[in-house]
Amino acid sequence: MEPTSTTLARTAQQSDSPAPRSVRRPRHDRDPQAGTAPHWYTAHPALGSGDARAAERLLRSTAPTPATCPALQHAARVLLHTGNPRRSATWCAKLHPHAPTPAWATAFLALRAEALLHLGDLAAAAHEAAEAQRTAGHRPTALRLWPTAVRAEALIALGRHEEAAAHLAPPAPEPSWSLAPWLRARGRLHLAAHRDRDAFDAFDAFRTTGRLALGHGAGGLPHLPWRSDMAEALLRRGRTDQARALLTEELGLPAAGPRHRGIALRLLGATDETGRRPGTLARAIGELRRCDDRVALARTMTDLAHALDTLDDASAPGFLRRATDLAADCGLPSAAP
């Protein structure tokens, strides 16, 4: 039996140290031109993870300097997390030209690429992530691999798996919390292969991410939906009960934003009885419409169309047409995952 998040939590507490022995606390590499080097997980305790209005106020009233950039990055991530990826992308585009260092320029480009990925603007996300990779140059590994992960995820969604694999090719860096996006992208690539062996590898990548998250003590932003990731890998292997337990836990977390809830509900639908599945998928669609994630919305509408068709519901073809149109708008090869 594969470990659930409860098992992972126990693993994280087995040693006297706050993290498992295999997990090293991220080393905060310093940019010589800045007081704090940027990472994908930069946070700011004075700004709540769900306070989009406060995030907007901070972004409007604060100029980017080495001292203020961590708060500005966190504010832009709060917008992303609360279902406002378009606003996050707009702010990152404004902040990038005024970034005080190349490292912070890289961070704002990478976060903008993330926001575009969440919007389903896959070609633009891949382009912005490539620009961030170029801006990163030979800077710390954690900073370079963040946009690499975003670019790979966009390429995977576009069906360009070989290109994505080239960006995620070994040698793999030592797992750490700062490299979690790269590890998740590797897992997404394995899932995209649709082979049994790759489902095992995907599960291992997501399990490692979960251990890192628990070891880091992550409970706010950025939120990593590693439970949903593991559940998706388990579903590919027919482990429905274990997947459902993880998804139920994910949906009970206050840190999960509308995008993460929507994706978790879509996966939960695959574990439902036939008659209950449309209701769960309809809830998923409601969450995904809140956050403008067109890719996840297209896939969920496809699932709903199939679920309704199984019940001989006449509305099934309409949902399938909308899903197909959304997928085409995003450049997806199909609306299927």
Image (tube, grey):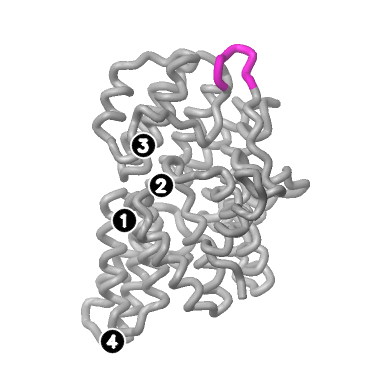
Tell me the quarter of the picture where residue 160 sits: bottom right
The residue depicted at 33 percent of the width and 23 percent of the height is: 59
> Label 3: few (<14), some or many (≥20) within 10 Å?
many
N-terminal of the pair, mark 4 or mark 3, is 3
Answer above or below: position of 31 versus 82.
above
The residue that mark 3 highlights is: 78
Q: Mark 3 is on which residue type? A: Val
Would you say the magenta stretch is mainly helix, strand or loop?
loop
Q: CA distance from mark 2 to mark 4?
A: 31 Å
User: In the drawing, what numbered circle is on residue 311?
Assistant: 4
Q: Give the SS element for disc 2.
A: helix
Quickly name the residue at label 2: 118
Confirm whether residue 167 shows in the render: no
Tell me the number on the disc at residue 288: 1
Asked if disc 1 and disc 4 are in contact, CB closer than 8 Å, the reply is no
The type of residue carrying mark 1 is Leu
Quadrant housing the N terminus: bottom right
Nearest to the eye among marks 3 and 2: give it: 3
- Residue 325 image point, x, y percent: 33, 61
The earlier-in-sequence mark between 2 and 1 is 2
* Label 1 secondary element: helix
Label 4 crowd (10 A; few <14 / some 14-19 / many >=20): few
Image spot of residue 136 (x, y percent)? 62, 27
